[in-house]
Structure formats: C-alpha cells, structure tokens
Amino acid sequence: MKVFDNNPKAVVIFFYLSDLKKAVHVMLLQGKTIVLGVCGGIAAYKAVALCSRLTQAGARVRVIMTESAVKFVTPLTFQAISRQPVAVDTFDEKEPSVISHIDLADRADLVVVAPATANMIAKLAMGIADDMLSTTLLATTAPLLIAPAMNVHMYTHPAVQRNIALLRERGAHFAEPGEGQLACGYVGKGRLAEPEQIVQLIENIFRRTLSLKGKKILVTSGATIERIDPVRYLTNDSSGKMGHAIAEAARDMGAHVTLISGKTALSSPHGVQLVPVVSAQDMLEAVLERFPEMDVVIKAAAVADYRPAMQQPRKMKKHSDRMTLELVRNPDILQTIGERKTRQFLVGFAAETDHLEEYALDKLRRKRCDLLVANDVTQEGAGFGTDTNKVRIYDANGLVADLPLMSKREVAGRLLNLVAERIGAAGNDT
C-alpha cells in the first residue's frame, strides 16, 4: 500500500475497485447452485477455500466428497462453510422424496471437481459410476469444470492425457494445473489451480452461458463429398473438429445450435441439432432452408470448389494410362448467404498456405462476412485433423485477434466471445 500513502484519492479508488470486483462476483454467482466434487488428494485443503469463496459470492454450494477425500478433510468442514449437508455415501439417503445423486445432478447450474484425481477423470471418461460423486457426474447435464491435481508423471501419462482429451471433446472445461513443488517432492505440472483462478473460470463459464442465450446459430462443419462413381469421390482433409468445437461451445453459451455437417468421423454433439449432408449442393440447400431464421451463421465446413461434370452410374474401369476428368464449379455457399443476409451475423473461414492476410481480407469483403477466421494450414498444429489451431480473426477494418496455438475448443470459445460482443453491441436481439 506504500504507493498510495500520499494519495488519499488513490486509496478510495483502490477500495472502490475492490468492492466493484466483489460486486461482479456476486452478480454472476448469486443464486447459482454449484456442486463441488472433492476427490482424495492433499490438494483437498484448497477446495475448502474454493467453497468459501463461492459461498461468499452468493452461490449455493453442495459438496460431494469421495471416501478418500474424507481422509484429508472432514465433511464437517465443508458443511460449516457451505451451510449445506455434505454427501459422501450413495446409499445414505436422508430425504425419502428424492434420490440424492439425481436431485443434486438436476439442481446443479455447474459441477466443479476440485481436486480431480487421475482415478476420477478416468471414471468420468469411461462412464463408470461406483460412488456418490461419479454417479452424480454421470447423471448431470450441467456444464462441468475439472481441476486436475496429481503427480507430474501421472498427469503427463498418455492414459490420463487421453482421458482429458476425450472429456474436452465432450465439452468439459478444465482448470489447468500449475507448475511448482508438488506434495510428493517432485517439481513439475500437477498442482491444483488456485481457488481464485477456479472462481474466475467459473465466472467465465456463467458469463459465456448467458452471452448467447436464446440466439439461433447455424454452424457448418466437415468436408463435402463429390461423387465420381459409386466407389470414388473428390473430397479434402477436413476432420470437422473445428466446426464441431464451435457448435459445442455455442451450445454451452446458451444458443440454439444447428450443425450442418459433411463427412467426419466425429460423433454428433449432445444438445445440438445435427443435419448430415454429403455434397456441396446438399449443404447449400440445407443452409438456405434454415438461413432466414438464424441470428448467426458460422461457415467452418471445407466445401469442394468443384464437382465432376458427370457422375458415372457404374464403377469406371481402367482403359488407358491417362484419364481426363471434367469438373464444373460448385455453388459458393458463403457468397450466396452473404448476398442474401439481412440481419444475420456471418463468420467465414479461410484455410490458406500463403498470403494469409491478403486472401483473408479479400474473401471477407467479397463475401460480406462480419468476421473471417484464417489459418495457415502449413504451420505445425494448425492444419486439418489436428486438435489444435492457430488462427487470425479479421473484420472489415483488419486484424481483430491473433490467437496463439491452442485447442480448437479454446479457439471456438474466443471466437464466440467476439461474436457475442458484436451482436450484443448491434442490438440483434431475438
């Protein structure tokens, strides 16, 4: 506080900002029911501080502890702080009118697991429900925030990382563990994120959940297929991971999401209306049918620019050393909806190999996009089929955001935050 000693006004501002920050916490968390799952690890003591901060911010915290967790912290501690009963045993039913784990799962606005052990992460990934916490986790449809805490070698083990990746794909949020001295004596990544960081992530989840509430968003994803004959076709390397990540993130932010998807090996995201298509023409028709009622259209699919002039009814046989295949141009879906848009907010994608900014801005202007997401697919981690991406986001005035390499789910969140800000500023209410 030395810096403020000779400036009383600064002291007033300092405390005003502190009170304002607390007011924001209360505004976001007031009345929210947060189920806090506590697993057995030395970091369980931090969950006490987390429970206290959430309670002070106005949240109703319902704690579920594993039997291992009670070896580190007593249920009475959490009960005293939360002023709510603490659940440990699945079969300890105190209220005859409800089944406890189903009631907690249904009431939750958010479920937080902190600390989350490798064992609990594996249970959740595999769908195992053999105690109060894992059973509740399997039954809830609320957003899920997982805060891992474990030995550095456990955290980096391929099995643990695979389970974390699977849960991310399903829409779980993660509080990345910190690096430093661990209780086991090792130095590395594995420390539970600090309570303040977890609270911030919780607020961000609720903020995002509200930001697109009620909006109708259409996302295109995957690759289109253009048939040559019954056994051959033209396509591209798109996996659909980026488009599916956007659809899932938009769903978590409260939007009504329609996902029009071409070829992909990904499963349909829960809570999203899936419209499967095959060709560029199929995708165009599906988009145009739904376009008038949409608030936002995000065109992340990799659509074939050309198709065979004739599709052969039977398998083509080899007759010579060379074959000429005549191609005709496919309709440009992004340009078509750009020309027809009235109130819709339009986001396009551009996968480039060179002159990224030049091509991106040209595409944005020609096709009347509000935002355009461009990536250089030659960069490591930013091409087709990867779980990560490195993108630049442009509007008509130029570069808006230059995002570093991050998971596609994180890219989706950052993009949708921009969309939410802009449609909010424009007053495009449904």
Image (cartoon, helix red, strand yellow):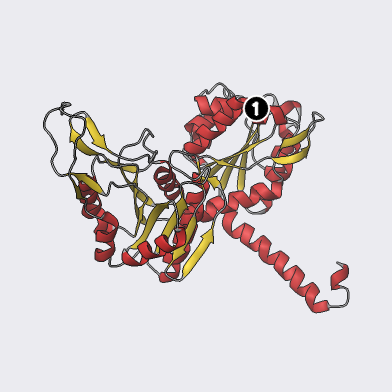
Q: Is residue 423 in view?
A: yes
Above or below, 406 against 85 in this view is: below
Tag 1: amino acid: Thr
Residue under numbered circle 1: 66
Residue positioned 72% across, 65% down in the render: 18
Residue depicted at x 49% and y 39%: 387
Q: Position of residue 267 (x, y in %)?
A: 38, 34
Camera sees residue 101: no
Q: Answer few, some or many: residues within 10 Å of disc 1's Cα (few below 14, many 20 plus, some between 14 and 19).
A: some
| Residue furthest out toward the left | 313
The one nearer the camera, 25 or 95, is: 25
The residue tagged with tag 1: helix, strand or loop? loop
Which residue is painted at 23% across and 51% down in the image? Answer: 284
Quadrant placement of the C terminus: bottom left
Most foreground residue, 211 or 419? 419
- Measured from the top left, where is residue 186 in percent x and y? 79, 31
Image quarter of residue 22: bottom right
Q: Is residue 415 above or below residue 181?
A: below
Residue 297's quadrant in the figure?
A: bottom left
* Front residue of 167 and 331: 331
Q: Of residues 350 and 4, which is closer to you in this image?
A: 350
**Count of picture labels:** 1
Percent from the top left, x then y, of residue 17?
A: 71, 68
> Which residue lies most toward the front here?
321
Horizontal side of residue 145 vs 153, given as left or right: left
Quadrant containing the N terminus is bottom right
Image coords of residue 20 (percent x, y): 67, 66
142 sits left or right of 89 in the view? left
User: 40 above or below 200?
Assistant: above
Residue 79: name its quadrant.
Answer: top right
